[in-house]
Image: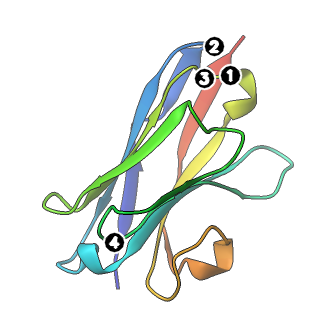
Amino acid sequence: QVQLVESGGGLVQAGGSLRLSCAASGRTFSTYYMGWFRQAPGKEREFVAAVSRSITSTYYADSVKGRFTISRDNAKNTVYLQMNSLKPEDTAVYYCAAGRRLFGTTLRLYDYWGQGTQVTVSS
């Protein structure tokens, strides 16, 4: 089992940047693929980005390609989401998630979730 704690959210103006972090407990972090999802008010939770165990593969939602970068440091048990050129439509609660079964972008492939961190982008 792994516990996930997100940090780094906040209020930023459109065009600005934020870096989210997700710290994982335990000694098996490198055996999980990691993902970031987000949920805006009144909307379903959606995929944002994912990174494989060995960092050889990444996936991005079309809406964030070229603006967001996912990375991980297995020595620090941490996954990051660098968000640049933020837009008001990026406003949401961002969740970190971990999975072991099949690397992908679907919510059901992820078994462990953090509590989320709020990102608000003002226009």
Mark 4 vs mark 3, foreground winner is 4
Q: Amino acid at mark 1?
A: Lys
Q: Position of residue 2 (x, y in %)?
A: 34, 78
Q: Quadrant of the C terminus?
A: top right
Q: Amino acid at mark 2?
A: Ala
- Whichever of callouts 4 and 3 sits on the residue coming sooner in the sequence is 4
Q: Are marks 1 and 3 in contact (CB under 8 Å)?
A: yes
- Whichever of callouts 2 and 4 sits on the residue coming sooner in the sequence is 2
Q: Is residue 29 shown above or below 94?
A: below
3D distance between C-alphas at marks 2 and 4 = 32 Å
Q: Amino acid at mark 3?
A: Leu
Residue 87's label in the rendered image is 1
Mark 2 vs mark 4, foreground winner is 4
Between 84 and 78, the one lying in front of the other is 84
- Whichever of callouts 2 and 3 sits on the residue coming sooner in the sequence is 2
Name the side, left or right, on which 53 lies relative to 28.
right
Q: Is residue 123 shown above or below 31?
A: above
Between 122 and 28, the one lying in front of the other is 28
